Amino acid sequence: MKLLSKYTLVNLFVSLGIFVIGGIIYFKAISYLSDQQLDRDLTEEYAEKVSFIDQHQRLPKPFEFDTYEAKFRDIGQYTEPIRFLDTIVSTNSGDKIISCRAIKGTVRFKGRNYEMTVTASTEATQSVVKLVSTITIALVILLFIALLVVNRIVFKSIWAPFYKLLEHLKDFSLAKSPSQPPVDPMKIVEFKELSHAIELMEERARDEYQSLKSFTENASHEMTTPVAVINSNLDNLIQDESLTKSQLEQLEGIYSASRRLSHLNQSLLLLVKIDNGLIHDLAEVDLANCVKVKIKQFGELLQDKNVKISLNLLPKTIKASNYLVDILITNLLSNAIRHNYYDGEIAIVLDETMLLIENTGKSETLDNHRIFERFQKEPSSEGTGLGLTIAKNICLSYGFKLEYQFAPPYHRFYILF
Amino acid sequence: MKLLIIEDELILAKSINTYLASEGNICEIAADVHSAIDKLSLYEYDAIVLDIGLPDGTGLEILNYLKSSRNDGGVIIISARNALDDRLTALNLGADDYLVKPFHLAELKARIMAIYRRRNFQGQNLLDYEQITVDLDKKEVNIEGKPLVLTKKEFDMLLYFIANKDKVISHNALVDHLWRDEVIWGESFDFLYTHIKNLRKKLTDATGKDYFSSVYGIGYKFN
């Protein structure tokens, strides 16, 4: 739930509760006050009527008192105390029932007791109460609307810096060039502190990342010189004509180890560069052409394994680094050849939405998650175990997806643009 | 040919020296910017092998010095850094070539020879080796005047072998040279053998002499 909705909802419930309770109290109070007023009037009337009866020793005629109607009932010797009550009476015409307030009491004349009921219509007061209630409810609704609108406007402007900070955080990437977190123009202390905290956090993250990055880079660079020393010494050593077969075999072993070390090193450096977005020579890359060039380059290797290759390439260009696309296709294609068997097949399909490279190979599926992880490789494979990670990271850096599927007998790697 | 190797890693410098110092080549070694500039101010060199990272500065300072002193020598950079920017900076400052560490000495020699040829030959750019004449501009090979048709890979390989004549070239160095980026690492060298075999056969057929001798398990020698 959004902060604004949550806040407005709480606000609404609380105000609704207060208004309901307040309304009830208000209603009761008005009713009470109007009843009081009516009761006072009735009491006066009652007293007037009693004194009239005392004076004239007869019951008054209806027209002699124009305000309130009085009714009399002979109750013999029975007396009743004076009391007030709410009642209803039907009008003279009898078609309408109206609610009334009444006072009942006993009057005595000519040796007999009469129950006198003086009634007053409460219609008037009730309509006042109704009117007041309507106005109140209208006001409440108006207030709610005003509250919602004001909340929304005020909320938006007060919390604007917060949302800006949120956007800033969402946008945060260690690889991007640093930008200052936005500062609250309204100078609300909490937001200022938040902005400051974010700035510090980003700085720290960036520092640590930077040192990690330069560590990886420096470590890789520092490794190249010893490997160069090994290589060059080997190059000189093999010039010696007195070397025996077994010595030459051992030297070949050292050669290939140093070669792998060097490739591992290059791959790690490349990964660091891709992950940090350090390769940004963006250009329009013609993928179909890239694939064709690569296949030509791999010609000997394909021939060597007698792998049949079928192409179905539609024109497709992407905005990417030529260098990285080259590596991407090299890695996928070299895997397709390397893990193929003799007389196997490779099919490459390119269209608007994807590039698919499928090859025959081992008859069991590969672990979909593990193959893209660093240093995950078959024990028999002499690769670095970084090829697919590099391919995946190149795809990720351009917002593409690299996925694997086993559709016997084909291992499918496809890039979704 | 007179060469200056500017490299602070002494073992590497010596190793380069050992490989290059033959056929009357003279090599000198400088381990830092200071001594390198001392040497450059006193002597003329045909080619300079320059490391970018030096203890008292960078190889770029030396490039600047060479530019201002109008030194004739060709410069090949050997650097641990493979960034495009570094490469472009060095080439813009007048370096002739850029080789990333680790490299094979055969590759270094082939490139030095190429730079040297580019700088010292006017007119027809021909390379002779016994009966073999290579026209580097037209990318053609003639055996005693008769053209020999080679594939691109075979042509590259022949040049590489001639540049490193009398040296054993390892399979690794050959594969690195011919396939550079697209090579499948750790794969057997079967596809290399096919190319060598073809080149060897063509040359033997045309010249009547087998220039290649294979060194067990490790590589080939051209002489």
Image (cartoon, helix red, strand yellow):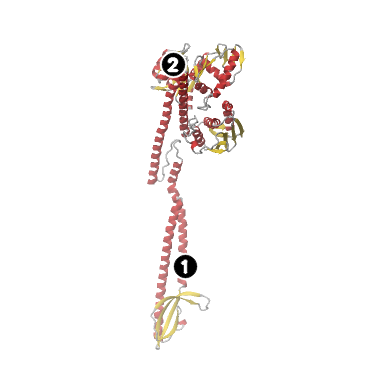
Dot 2: chain letter? B
User: With respect to residue B179, does B167 lie above or below?
Assistant: above
A394 shown above or below B114: below
Label 1 SS:
helix
Per the image, the residue denoted by label 2 is B17
> Could you classify mark 1 by the number of other residues whose Cα lies within 10 Å: few (under 14), some (14-19), or many (20 or more)?
few
- State left or right for residue A111 relative to residue B115: left
Q: Which of marks 2 and 1 is in front?
A: 2
- Percent position of residue A222, x then y: 41, 26
Residue A25 position in % (x across, y down): 41, 65
Q: Quadrant of residue B138?
A: top right
Instruction: Residue type at mark 1: give it.
Output: Lys
- In the rendered image, which quarter is residue A313 located in? top right
Would you say B10 lies left or right of B219 here?
left
Between residue A256 and residue A27, name the one nearer to us: A256
Near mark 2 (Cα within 10 A), the count class, few <14, some 14-19 or many ≥20, is many
Q: Residue A197: x and y, percent?
A: 38, 42
The chain identifier of the residue carrying mark 1 reads: A
Residue A13 visible at all: yes
What amino acid is labelled 2 in the image? Asn
Residue B101 visible at all: no
Q: Name the residue under label 1.
A: A130
User: Considering the numbered disc 2 on the image, is that residue within a helix, a strand or a loop?
Assistant: helix
Q: What's the CA distance linking mark 2 and mark 1?
A: 110 Å
Check the image and report above or below for A257 versus A318. above
Would you say A347 lies left or right of A25 here? right
